[in-house]
Amino acid sequence: MVLAELGVVAGFTVSILLFWSPLLAVTRLRELFRWPTSWLVVNYLFVGGGMVAVQTFSYLAIILLTAGTGTVTGSDAVGIVGGVIVSNLLLPAVISLAALRILPERGYWTPTGDGLNGHIALGIGVIWYGVITSVGFVLIGLALMFAKLPM
């Protein structure tokens, strides 16, 4: 049974990374993934996968804090979805603020340069991440709900 849950998390991670990847066309966002190795794809999978993994653990915490281990009621579901949407914006915002503080000091990223300002690009990236993770969470929740309906 654990393999099925891990498959759902892996599918969620792959879809989030796939739908966020068009933003790598923005030079300032692509430059964020110059660390920890010199390969963009490896860094994107490593950093993005780690971020989605932390995001998934935040979902578990929200579910346990809202509904506990019992049956989920309608009001619990509303609390869970609301908590997930807040988490989908709060977590990447905090990580982005840390990146704004740490990466320029170490010479890995400069928010200014040719093209779109890095601060604006990062804000767009955070909002887009929040949208795709929220939509993905709701779609997976609906799929699991319909899969458990009696026939």
Image (cartoon, rainbow, N blue to C red):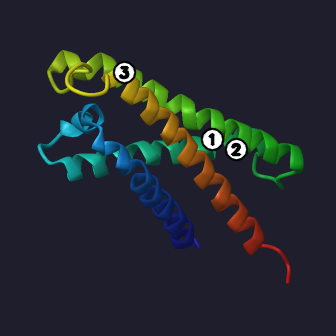
Q: Kindly identify the residue that appears in the image at 45 percent across and 32 percent down.
A: 124
Which residue occupies the extreme right position in the image? 74
| Quadrant occupied by the N terminus | bottom right
* Relative vertical location of residue 5 with respect to residue 34 in this rendering, above or below: below
Q: Earlier in the sequence, mark 1 or mark 3?
A: 1
User: x and y percent of residue 19 in the render?
Assistant: 44, 53
> Regarding mark 2 in the picture, which secondary structure is present there?
helix
Give the Cα distance between marks 2 and 3.
Answer: 34 Å
Q: Kindly identify the residue that appears in the image at 57 percent across and 40 percent down.
A: 58
Residue 49 visible in the displayed image: no
| Quadrant occupied by the C terminus | bottom right
Which residue occupies the extreme front position in the image? 115
| Residue with the mark numbered 1 | 61
Q: Kindly identify the residue that appears in the image at 64 percent across and 32 percent down.
A: 86
- Amino acid type, label 3: His
Residue closer to the observer: 29 or 78: 29
Frontmost of labels 2 and 3 is: 3
Q: Kindly identify the residue that appears in the image at 40 percent across and 57 percent down.
A: 18
Give the side of residue 110 with respect to residue 90, left or right: left
| Residue with the mark numbered 3 | 119
- Amino acid type, label 1: Ala
> Regarding mark 3 in the picture, which secondary structure is present there?
helix
- Amino acid type, label 2: Leu
* Relative vertical location of residue 142 with respect to residue 89 in this rendering, above or below: below
